[in-house]
Amino acid sequence: MESLGIIVAFYLLSAIAVGGAIGVFLASDLIRALAFLVLSFIATAGLFLTLSGDFIAIAQILIYAGAIPVLIVFAVMLAPLAGRNNGNGLYLVPGLALGAAVAVTVAFVAVDVEWNELSGALLAERDFATTAGAIGDALVGRYVLAFEIASVLLLAALIGAIVLVREDEAT
Amino acid sequence: MNSTLRQGRRRPAAKVPLGLMIVGAVFALGFLAVNAAIGYVVIDGRLDGQWYDIRDLGIAVEELKVQLDAINDDQPSFLDDIVGQHWMSYAVGALLGAIGILSFIGGALLALIWIERRLIGRMQIRRGPNRVGPYGLLQPVADAVKLIQKEVLMPDGADRILFLLPPAIIFVPMMAAWGPVPWAPQMAYLDINVGVLYLIAVSSLTTLAVFLAGWASNNHYALLGSMRTVAMMISYEIPLSIALLSVVLITGSMQLSEIVQWQADHNLWLAALLPIAMLTYFFSSTAELNRTPNDIAEAESEIVAGFHTEYSGMKFGLFYAVELGNALLVATLVATFFLGGWSLFGLEEWIPGYLILFAKLSAAYFVLVWLRGTLPRFRLDQLMRFAWQYLIPLSLFNLIIVAVEASLLARWDAPGLVSLGLFTIVNWGAAYILFRDWARRIGYQPDAGGPRRAELTQQVGGIEAAHRMGTAT
């Protein structure tokens, strides 16, 4: 049985996250939608914190609340069609379908996993005192191949972006 | 005029009355006695770990927590299920730390406005604020009262919610970033093991608040300023993060208290070991802070006041306070990461760690004020080029060097003086070569006919002329 504080925090953060997500959907102004999105991301980071996932929570804030909004801001500024209006319903049906698919997948995993196996004394046995260290060990140890592939992929994307936007010296 | 001023500057020593001398002697003796008593207690080890050890206020808080836990142990068991077993120690600890940080920042902000304006005044050969209260000390209070009284205007067509939100949300990252700073061995409010990442993450939230402020103002200058800020922040966050990464590599920890402990254990400030990282971090921080020489986001001569053009009254005051608070935070982080934090080669046994850290952060803050008082502003494209073509390659080179050294340090079983001394020499050599040669590589030409000294000031007579005109303090 968790203490009351954790339960209150869980429901509060979940409400903020879901409310923010709904706000993204309903806001007519694109920048307001962005603000709602950041609110939702930060609440999700808080959810990670209630699970003692300090590294993942801070990575969430760093990437999703810090970097992704800047990316969206640049998209809004640079893409002529983005404008200020969020009312474009062109991708409503595919978007809903994708969202439903993700929700179903997550729900299936949540129901399927035997959570009781990974709680209490059994969780304490695994000794996750520092998640950052454990994640680091896993990344350059067991999952080093995936890590390297991801880095090569990102490097290729970086170079591709530079090649795409490069102005020709001759012209 | 000249002669009277000169005489005023060399005032003969006044005759000290006998009573004052006696009082002074008594005070001096008392001071020595207190010092001797402190020395006795410290050498004797009577303070170590006691709750009245003022060198580390964290010990007192820990003691208080133990007492509170003892009280909590007597509570009825059904309360354990509802509010948790030791809720009082959590609540009191959180409250004490928050109050401590808030009162420090609140006091420091008021003091800093005065100190900074006086210092810059002195550097620019003028007086600075000197009318409100003795030496103008009450000027910040008067400013705050004036700002609160002013009307808060909102431009036509501004996004009402998004216009009112940023002054509030920009305050949160500034406050939150003070959490992991260790003021003494046990005196850190939020000593998490991913402290460095936490700092980077929290400070990146400022970008969004600044952008929202500029966007919602419905003003071209404000939008330009906020776009400049966003572009600059994402550029300078890269060298800043890489500089901190090299600190993490060499100390082997992302926990701020561990980083300081490493410096205390090795009796070595990281400023000596990692000069490139230190300079990169310092310069990138001034860009993140929007301070001269990098204040293009609010360049008054170009875009009025940048992203807070349309803000008036206390909403502008909040932006101003956050700017100062962030400057103070950067000074604190430089002192923590690179200048040894609360440690001072064993002197922390005698002097409270928070006083040492305060002295160091004051020194770092002075350098920030100095830069602001002396350097002209960069142009936007110069600043961008400087980040992408100069700082990022340099910090990447530095990262490679430091990574090699860190892996050597983990394997090589040499005494610290040998290995770290060698690394220090290598790093300073690398810093010299990299800073000089990379600048030449990207087209910097030293001595292209420009004056080597501030000739214009010398031609009009320099500081002497200022004294003649009676404008210098």
Image (cartoon, helix red, strand yellow):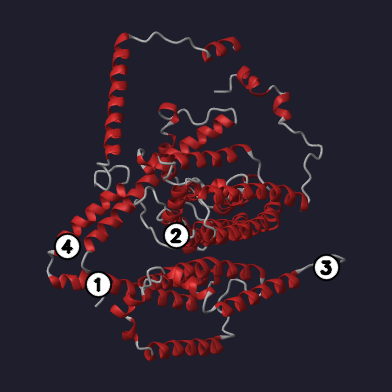
Give the amino acid at mark 2. Gly
Query: Which of the 4 quarters of the picture holds residue B242?
Result: bottom right
Task: Say which residue label 3 marks.
Answer: A168
Whether residue B240 sits left or right of residue A131 in the image: it is: right
Using the numbered discs, state the Cα–Cα distance from disc 1 to disc 4 in whole angstroms: 16 Å
Mark earlier in primary sequence (4, 2): 4
Query: Which of the 4 quarters of the picture holds residue A22?
Result: bottom left
Q: Residues within 10 Å of mark 1 (few under 14, many from 20)?
A: some
At mark 3, the secondary structure is loop
Task: Say which residue label 2 marks.
Answer: B195
Q: Chain of mark 4?
A: B
At mark 1, the secondary structure is helix
Labels 1, 4: one chain: no
Using the numbered discs, state the Cα–Cα distance from disc 2 to disc 1 in whole angstroms: 27 Å
Give the amino acid at mark 3. Asp
Residue A164 visible in the displayed image: yes
Image height of A127 relative to B32, above or below: below
At mark 2, the secondary structure is helix
Task: Say which residue label 1 marks.
Answer: A4
Task: Say which residue label 4 marks.
Answer: B72
